[in-house]
Amino acid sequence: MRLANFAAFFFAMASAFMLYSLNYETRRLEANVQAQEKAAGKARSDIAVLKAEKSHLSRPDRIDALARAQGLTPPRPGQMPNNARLATATDVDPGQR
Amino acid sequence: MPALRPRRMLILGSVEMQKRTAQTQTSTHDTPPGALRRRIANALLFGAVLAMFGAVGGRLVYLGIHTGPQVTLAVSDAVPTSFARPDIIDRGGRLLATDIEVPSLFADPAIVLDRDEVVEKLASVIPDLDQAELRHALADKSRRFVWIRRGLAPKVAQRIHDLGLPGLAFRKELRRAYPAGELAGHVLGAVNVDNKGVAGIEKHIDDVIGVDAVHGAELSARSPVRLSLDIGVQHTLEDELETAVRRYHTKGAAGVILDIRSGEVLASASLPRTDPSRPAMGLDPSRLDKISGGTYELGSVFKTMTVAMALDEGTATSATVLDVREPLIAGRFTITDFHPAGRPLSISEIFTLSSNVGSGMLALQAGPEKFRGFMQRIGLIDPIHTEAGPVSAPQVPERFERIELITMSYGHGIAVAPMQFAAAAASLLNGGTLVKPTFLRFRPDAATKPVQVASDLTSREMARLFRLNVLDPIGTGKRADVPGFRVGGKTGTADRAESGRYEEKTVISSFLGVFPMDAPQYLTFVLLFEPKGTEETGGQRTASLNAAPVTGRLIRRIAPQLSVAPLMAEVTQ
């Protein structure tokens, strides 16, 4: 009987310790998950802001003004080759170049 | 001997057992009552501990297997709700609208120690703060939540934080950001303070695509909404319209660019513009979306419909010649041509010379039933809507009598929204299939069969007339030509009706352009509201002198963006 008591006591202590360890580990993991989720949320938020800033910086009216300041102008029709012209260009005999 | 040993052991064993049994009997009889009770108590304790462990173990197993009902918490104060919205991108994937996290300031009046100090210090950081209202709100200590300012700039939030005022706190919220500023503002619409769409595409997202109610600042995981707009083409259209407003001193301008095969709207602009991040701006009547939100008598550009009707109904062919020398009389009204030709005109000439008398005669020849039937078929009678909202319903006369037929034939007496008119014109130039304008990227649906509203022959003939009107040295659209890009089009100069009468000096000039005319793909419709005569136009305000050249400059810039290759033979002209 005494042995059974000792066994029960030991079992109780072991279980309590195990439960405490599990509880502690669970809380640690929960905190870890929360921290990761918070970091992911922060990263998503930062990405959204950066995307918005990138789009703001590359908005057409700004690029247009910058391009014109560099002396660039909208393309003229004559600058654009069409298929017929490209075909002519490739038909040239390499030996004549 | 070996046979005896077990027997001895058995004998010895039985003797030993007898002794032990006797001892046990003796000790049982000799056990005191206290010791027995202890043993019973120990046994009970042992049983209780076992039962408790069993219960705990059983419960753990139960909880591990069984997922219980969702727990619902009820709170006394309403938790502020916001909406997470999907991004809006243009057809090329460029960002037009997105959600970003911003701090919003609130107060707990029960914790605020000195409301006067709070109000005064906050006013130093937020100058437009309504101090009286905030003082009144903070006086009610029973309230535990009072919004002070939502959607603060991070720098402003930091300055408020640095004030160190008790009772104030921040909550992260979602705010709609429009990186391209006012670009396509009328199309995008607006959201309210809760990030809920109230106009334009933003409202369409709420009504059809869906948004997610969130507490806090959780970004939407939904796929972006891809529009048909091309922000490069959109910018070019707005830029050219702005230039036109300055050049011709107009009260406003508007334009739309359509893909006539799919009905996709590549650009839609109305000046003055509106800023989607400032919803109140959209309530200003002067900033009305003139493309979809207003109806106008469009003038001679409407002859496109009249001529197409005559060709499609078979009441005339392009070779038909009408005597337009005499004006048309309808009651007390006399209809004449702006530039009388003084000779009979073919249908082609009626179109290129923009003869009011000729188009009136075509409408009269067809009669009210055919005229109304054709207009209904191409979508000019019934209201339409797009994803950006309903298009203003056309204003059509109740009866199609002689005078109504004549005036409608050249674009007066019938008022339609430019978007609806552009869609109808696109239907006439794409082979004759009905165009439903859309602001979403078009995905061909095999189940939807195209609706034929005009014959292919009519469509090709209209394309020929459009091109002729630009190529012909006396055509009204010659100033819209862009070498290499095969532009076609029709002008319209409509007197504006004010106080029940037409004002000759206030006009809406417009140009309906299409390119490339050898395989029509894109349609532009440009409107200038009340342009003034300038030195460049010789004091005139007709569309051939303002709207047509604006369209030419516009097409020169957008055609390369739309991958329309120039024909070099024409470039060298």
Image (cartoon, coloured by chain):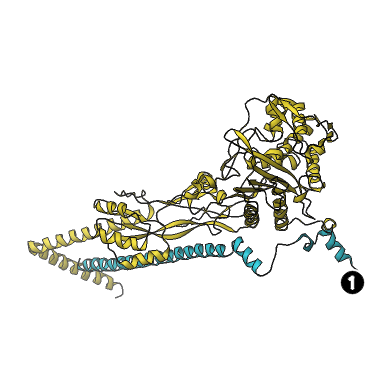
Chain colours: A cyan, B yellow
B234 to B289, vertically: above or below: below
Spot occupied by residue B371 in the image (x, y as percentages of width and height): 71, 29
Residue B508 vs residue B65, the one in the foreground: B508
Spot occupied by residue B486 in the image (x, y as percentages of width and height): 79, 51
Mark 1 belongs to chain: A
B98 to A71, vertically: above or below: above
Q: Which quadrant is home to the N terminus of chain B? A: bottom left
Classify mark 1: helix, strand or loop. helix
Residue B301 vs residue B374, the one in the foreground: B301
Spot occupied by residue B253 in the image (x, y as percentages of width and height): 62, 48
Q: Which quadrant is home to the C terminus of chain B? A: bottom right
Spot occupied by residue B175 in the image (x, y as percentages of width and height): 46, 56
In terms of image quadrants, where is residue B369? top right
Q: Amino acid at mark 1?
A: Pro
In terms of image quadrants, where is residue B383? top right
**Labels in figure, total:** 1
Residue at 28% x, 71% y is: B6
Would residue B449 be seen by someone viewing this image from the given angle?
no
**To which residue does mark 1 refer?**
A94
